[in-house]
Amino acid sequence: MAQRNLFRVLACLLPFAGTPGFLFCARHFCNCGHLVHPPYPAWYILSDYFRLGSFAGAAILAVCSRLSLRYYLTFALGALAVQRLLLNSGMGLAFDVLWLVVLYVMCIRELTRRRQVES
């Protein structure tokens, strides 16, 4: 039971850790694709891996946790990854910001809801 609660907390906090990398990623993509015009510093690539790892980890932990919105959270994280990597942010930065706001609202809602129930 305590492990699922830890999964819940980590699933809600990992997207916050990956967001700076997600926003920074907007600096090194263009209409040609993601990281198409090298050379890029190694920390650009490390930033991408950290972002993808934190978002994928959050999605996996959300599915394994007691989150009431676990599937919606997983869908939002997947939508952000597809939008940035497969569609080359073709829907624009406004779409990214919309999904980030939705993601943050879900995470904050889950963290505060459980805290109210448990206390």
Image (cartoon, helix red, strand yellow):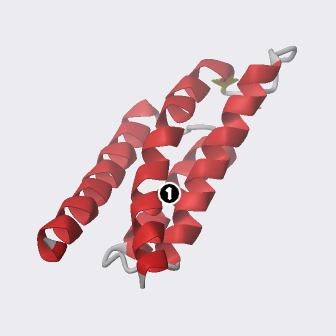
Pinpoint residue 35: horizontal percent, then vertical percent.
77, 27
Say if 60 sits above or below 111 in the image. Answer: below
Q: Is residue 109 above or below residue 81?
A: below
Answer few, some or many: residues within 10 Å of disc 1's Cα (few below 14, many 20 plus, some between 14 and 19): many
Residue under the point 53% across and 40% down: 18
In this view, the residue in front, 117 or 72, is 117
Q: Say if 15 sits above or below 119 in the image.
A: above
What is the count of numbered marks? Answer: 1
Q: Judge from the rendering whether residue 13 lies leftward or rightward of residue 106; answer left or right.
A: right
Task: Identify the residue shown where x is 30% and y is 45%.
Answer: 101
Toward the viewer: 14 or 51?
A: 14
Read off the residue under disc 1: 77
> In the picture, which quadrant includes the N terminus?
bottom left
Which amino acid type is shown beneath numbered disc 1?
Leu
Q: Quadrant of the C terminus?
A: bottom left
- Establish if 24 lies above or below 5: above
- Residue in view at x 72 percent, y 40 percent: 49
In this orientation, does residue 6 appear?
A: yes
* Foreground residue among 56 and 82: 56
State the SS at label 1: helix
- Quick check: 75 left or right of 104? right
Residue 65 makes an appearance in the image? no
Q: Residue furthest bottom?
A: 1
Residue 20: % across, % down: 50, 30
x 14%, y 75%: residue: 117
